[in-house]
Each structure stands twice: as structure tokens, then as C-alpha cells.
Image (cartoon, helix red, strand yellow):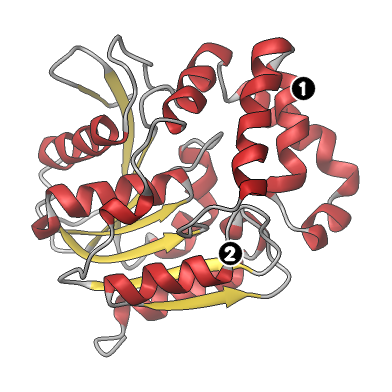
Amino acid sequence: MPYLKTADGCRIYYELLGEGFGRPTITFVNGTLQTTVYWKPAAKELVHQYRLLVYDARGQGESDLGALPLSLQLHASDLKALLDETGIHLTAVVAISHGARVALALADQSPDRISRMVLCSISTRATFRARMIVRSWHEILQRHSLDAMVWAAVPHMFGRTYLRANERQLERIVKTLVRRNRTESLRAHLEALQNYPPLGALLKSLPFLVLVLTGADDPLVTTEGAEEIARICGGRHIELKGVGHSITAEAPGEFNRLISEFLSNTRS
């Protein structure tokens, strides 16, 4: 399996999908609890047109946690190092939730490496409720188990329509998420999140096209906050009805259509 070994000795797992160096590239950036597997349904549709880079950030999936304290800037530096390692000089970035923060941090560090950006399930001015939800995940992980924390997170990760439609599959979904995560790494991730700089500090007009996607049934973001990101970055916002935080899993067809149209339309 391919790994990037960072300057501090941390191994970052990645996959390059699709052949042909002449093809445009899309880099996918995971959210909390996610691994490269999350993007496989989208990759299956997009790999015929694009070269795709998926990877696990520090502490996710097959990647090491490493010895350095986790931070937003460290994640962004890892991503830049991965682009250097794979010879990707310019890429579209599709990122969700925590990954969207990493994408914005990369845009702040190296805007010349990004051709277009899709930010999913993110907004400014997180509500008190959203902050308490994430805090509760950390507390549950500290006091109980990874299994209990994931069960607590699932109702906030997915919209009501998806939860009702997949009620009989929820136990399998939880077991899968538990299997793909490690308690120590997730604890470090949630602790680091509480010390991230305000999202507003990363927002500015960007020299490339930006699309912000959110679900109307997402308790962790707000419509107003997503619209604010799009306005400041010079992009546009689309809200998906009946969809929660996990847009790719809940509305894969609509997600793929919007991504394809945005990346291929010269007037987007």
C-alpha cells in the first residue's frame, strides 16, 4: 500500500485512482470518522474523467497518528506534502466537514495548487448546539467507549430521511465506523478540534471557483453560515433538501451530478 512518510516520520496512506497524467485531478479530503472508503462510490463515477487522490489524514484509517500534536495547519501541510509526493501541481479539491477546514487551510497556504474547490457540510458561526454535540462526542469517548461515541454521533451525521430508510442497517453502519477508527486517534482529533482557529480567520476571496454544498437537515451547520462562506470566498451555495451532514452517502447521485457539472462547466 502506498504511504507518504512526512518529515516527522508519520506515514500517511493514500491511493491514486485513474490512469493518465494528462487528466485533471480531484483530491478528496475526509471528514471526522471517515476514511478513503467514504469516497469510493463517487470515485467509481468520476474515475473515467479524472485522476483521483484519496487519503487518510493523520489518525484516520490506515494512516499513523504520529507524535506531533494535531492541528489544522499540520493537516494542511501534510496535504501539501502529499501533492508534492504524487507530483500533483494543480488539483480540484472536494472536501467535507473537517476536511473542508483542511481544504481552506491549504488554500490559505498554497492557493496556486488548487484549480477549484467544493466544500461540503461546513458553515461559519457554529451554533451552540453544534459545539455541544461535538463536545459530547469527546466526553463520551473519554468516559465510555468508541462504540458508544459512534452511536451518539450517527443521529447527527445523517439526515432523518436516510436514518429512516436505513434503520435496519444502523447497527452494521456503526460497527463499520467503529472498525475503521481508533480510540486514541479519534480522541486526539476531537481534542485538537477544540483549539482550531475560528473559521472566519481562513475565509477570504479565493482565486478559483468555489462551490459550497450543505444538507437542509444537517444539525451541525447553518444555511446562513454556508451562504456566508460562499459569499466571502466568491463562490455559490447549494442546499440539498432532505439531506443531512453526510452528503455523499445520503445523496450520491445528486452529489456526483453537482460535482461533475461544477468541475466541467467553464462558466460555473
Q: Which residue is mark 2?
A: 222
Label 1 SS:
helix
Q: Earlier in the sequence, mark 1 or mark 2?
A: 1
Please state the horizontal and vertical placement of residue 172, each as a whole percent of the image.
Answer: 79, 33
Please state the horizontal and vertical placement of residue 80, each as a whole percent of the image.
Answer: 17, 40
Left or right of 145 in this view: 69: left
Q: Quadrant of residue 146?
A: top right
237 vs 129: above or below: below
Amino acid of disc 2: Thr
31 vs 259: above or below: above
Amino acid of disc 1: Ala
Left or right of 85 in this view: 230: right
Total tally of numbered discs in the picture: 2
**At 56% across and 34% down in the image, what residue appears?**
33
**At 14% across and 47% down in the image, what residue appears?**
109
Q: Which residue is mark 1?
A: 148
Q: How far apart are the alpha carbons under marks 1 and 2?
A: 26 Å
Q: Nearer the viewer, residue 102 or 54?
A: 102
Label 2 SS:
loop
Q: Nearer the viewer, residue 208 or 73?
A: 73
Q: Looking at this view, name the residue that lies furthest to the front.
A: 128
Please state the horizontal and vertical placement of residue 233, each as a whole percent of the image.
Answer: 28, 70
Please state the horizontal and vertical placement of residue 211, each as a whole percent of the image.
Answer: 38, 72
Left or right of 122 in this view: 267: left
Badge 2: few (under 14), some or many (20 or more) residues near its Cα, within 10 Å?
many
Q: Which mark is residue 261?
A: none
Badge 1: few (under 14), some or many (20 or more) residues near its Cα, within 10 Å?
some
